[in-house]
Image (cartoon, rainbow, N blue to C red):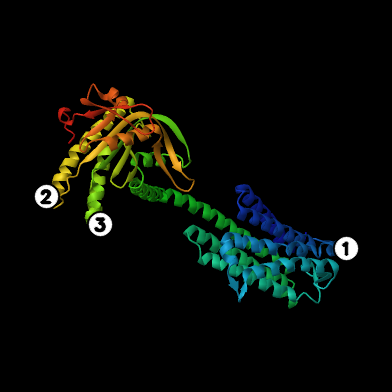
């Protein structure tokens, strides 16, 4: 056995083991697949070189003569692809090397591989028939174009050195950076040793081609060390930094939760909080839909507010109206009502949707709310009087219980949660018929609350859209004995 074949044979075994180890470790990882192909292709190339040196006849030598290069040139494809994969492919391909986009260099290398293979197969311009040298044994003969090979090798070396270097510079994690440095040293070292042993030295008559396998051996040992170190440091990083990562992640989740809560609070100022809460819990979807439900419906407005608006400064009107609506909205929410909308000084509230406490409890809550609103209005009127506002503000309230369609109305681009229907119109008409400072309710609502809240029959009123007079009741606010404060 020719001892000069040992470097290539050892390199073949090491490369084969490394390629199988990598692909079995994680076959789904793209960088692992490229490294597997690179090592396997390189193993076949150096294995063919070992068989050249083991040849015992000229016929055998000439058979194996070109195989190391035929199998070796495709390695260039995997070198570029693996370098790109571990160095941030997308960002690297946007960069330029000596003013030329890296994508162009990549395609130059791709195009040269089949060209080299064609020349090798069809002529002896690169490799001439094998020659026997003592003591190394059979070696390649070199053709007229062989001096171009080291130039091409240096060009290839520059290309993927640049890719790997830029990958090191842009690495965001310490482990990732160390892995790229080790890969850089392994691949560059292999290429340098390969060019020296397989190209440069033979050009000067030194038959060192038998030692070409030293480069792959060096690469295997360093890559194996790099992969083991990366795994060890990953385990150590997970072990030592787990609490830190958990703490950081917890902080991020708390921050996200705060932002979500803040967003919910902000949205609740535009949409009723009950509806907002349902949206954030995923119980509501943004689709145009509605359902029939028994609701207690409430309308209120301020008597002669238009007259006050016409006679007052717009800033004073806005300040007073915002204070009024803000206080009243808090009362509605306190008693579990939902506000579909404000219309000027008018307040529309519903009880029984999106959640219901029961039809009697919904009606009682609405009445308690209306009574507190009237008391609060008297306090506000006194406060505004002392501030110089002389208009005798009083509110009218209308309440009715009945079936209504409740849900999302509008368009796919903009919608609101509301209740509509004939019974909604009746509640609005009761509010319009109501005397200032009073609370009017329909017979349907009176029947639900009569045992708890004293009322007096007002009589019947004619309501547009109804074919029969509507029995109406007035809440005896002074007799309720309820302290809403």
Which residue is more in the foreground, 416 or 210?
A: 416
Identify the disc placed on residue 314: 3
Left or right placement of residue 302 versus residue 227 in this view: left
- In three-dimensional space, the C-alpha distance between marks 2 and 3, rounded to whole angstroms, equals 20 Å
- Residue 315: % across, % down: 24, 57
Identify the disc placed on residue 59: 1
Which residue is more in the foreground, 210 or 44?
A: 44
Q: Is residue 405 visible?
A: yes
Read off the residue under disc 2. 386
Q: Are marks 1 and 3 in contact (CB under 8 Å)?
A: no
Which corner quadrant of the image does residue 352 belong to? top left
The secondary element bearing badge 2 is classed as helix
- In three-dimensional space, the C-alpha distance between marks 1 and 3, rounded to whole angstroms, equals 106 Å
- Residue 164: % across, % down: 58, 66
Nearer the observer, disc 1 or disc 3? 3
Q: Are marks 2 and 3 in contact (CB under 8 Å)?
A: no
Residue occupying the far left of the picture = 386
The earlier-in-sequence mark between 2 and 3 is 3
Left or right placement of residue 29 versus residue 438 in this view: right
Which corner quadrant of the image does residue 66 belong to? bottom right
Left or right placement of residue 474 versus residue 161 in this view: left
The secondary element bearing badge 3 is classed as helix
Q: Is residue 283 visible?
A: no
Q: Residue at x 62, y 51 (%)?
A: 22
The earlier-in-sequence mark between 2 and 1 is 1
Does residue 92 sit above or below 255 in this rendering?
A: below
Q: Label 3 crowding class (10 Å Cα cut-off): few <14, some 14-19, many 20+?
A: few
Q: Label 1 crowding class (10 Å Cα cut-off): few <14, some 14-19, many 20+?
A: few
Which residue is more in the foreground, 87 or 259?
A: 259
Residue occupying the far right of the picture = 59
- Residue 420: % across, % down: 40, 36
Numbered label tally: 3
């Amino acid at each position: 056995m020719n001892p000069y074949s040992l470097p290539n044979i050892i390199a073949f075994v090491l490369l084969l083991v490394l390629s199988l180890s990598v692909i079995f470790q994680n076959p789904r990882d793209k960088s692992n697949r490229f490294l597997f192909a690179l090592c396997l292709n390189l193993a076949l190339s150096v294995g063919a070189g070992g068989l050249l040196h083991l040849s015992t006849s000229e016929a055998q030598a000439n058979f194996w003569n070109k195989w190391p290069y035929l199998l070796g040139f495709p390695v260039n494809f995997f070198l570029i692809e693996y370098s790109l994969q571990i160095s941030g492919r997308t960002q690297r391909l946007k960069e330029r090397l000596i003013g030329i986009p890296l994508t162009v260099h990549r395609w130059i290398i791709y195009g040269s591989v089949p060209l080299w293979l064609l020349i090798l197969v069809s002529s002896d311009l690169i490799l001439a028939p094998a020659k026997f040298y003592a003591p190394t044994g059979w070696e390649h003969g070199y053709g007229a174009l062989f001096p171009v090979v080291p130039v091409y090798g240096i060009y290839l070396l520059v290309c993927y050195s640049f890719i790997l270097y830029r990958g090191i510079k842009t690495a965001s994690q310490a482990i990732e950076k160390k892995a790229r440095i080790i890969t850089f040293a392994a691949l560059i070292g292999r290429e340098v040793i390969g060019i020296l042993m397989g190209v440069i030295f033979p050009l000067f008559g030194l038959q060192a081609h038998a030692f070409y396998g030293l480069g792959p051996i060096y690469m295997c040992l360093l890559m194996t060390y790099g992969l083991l170190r990366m795994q060890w440091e990953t385990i150590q990083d997970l072990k030592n930094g787990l609490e830190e990562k958990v703490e950081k992640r917890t902080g991020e989740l708390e921050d996200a939760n705060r932002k979500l809560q803040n967003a919910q609070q902000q949205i609740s100022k535009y949409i009723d909080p009950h509806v907002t809460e349902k949206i954030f819990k995923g119980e509501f979807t943004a689709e145009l839909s509605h359902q029939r439900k028994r609701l207690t419906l409430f309308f209120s407005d301020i008597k002669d507010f238009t007259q006050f608006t016409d006679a007052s400064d717009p800033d004073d009107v806005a300040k007073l109206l915002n204070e009024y609506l803000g206080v009243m909205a808090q009362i509605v929410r306190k008693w579990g009502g939902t506000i579909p909308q404000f219309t000027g000084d008018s307040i529309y509230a519903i009880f029984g949707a999106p959640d219901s406490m029961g039809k009697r409890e919904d009606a009682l809550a609405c009445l308690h709310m209306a009574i507190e609103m009237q008391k609060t209005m008297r306090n506000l009127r006194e406060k505004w009087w002392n501030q110089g506002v002389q208009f005798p503000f009083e509110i009218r309230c209308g309440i009715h219980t009945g079936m209504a369609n409740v849900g999302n109305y509008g368009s796919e681009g903009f919608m609101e949660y509301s209740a509509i229907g004939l019974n909604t119109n009746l509640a609005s008409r009761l509010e319009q018929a109501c005397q200032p400072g009073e609370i009017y309710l329909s017979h349907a609502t009176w029947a639900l609350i009569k045992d708890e809240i004293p009322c007096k029959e007002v009589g019947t009123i004619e309501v547009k859209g109804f074919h029969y007079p509507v029995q109406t009741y007035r809440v005896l606010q002074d007799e309720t004995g309820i302290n809403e404060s």
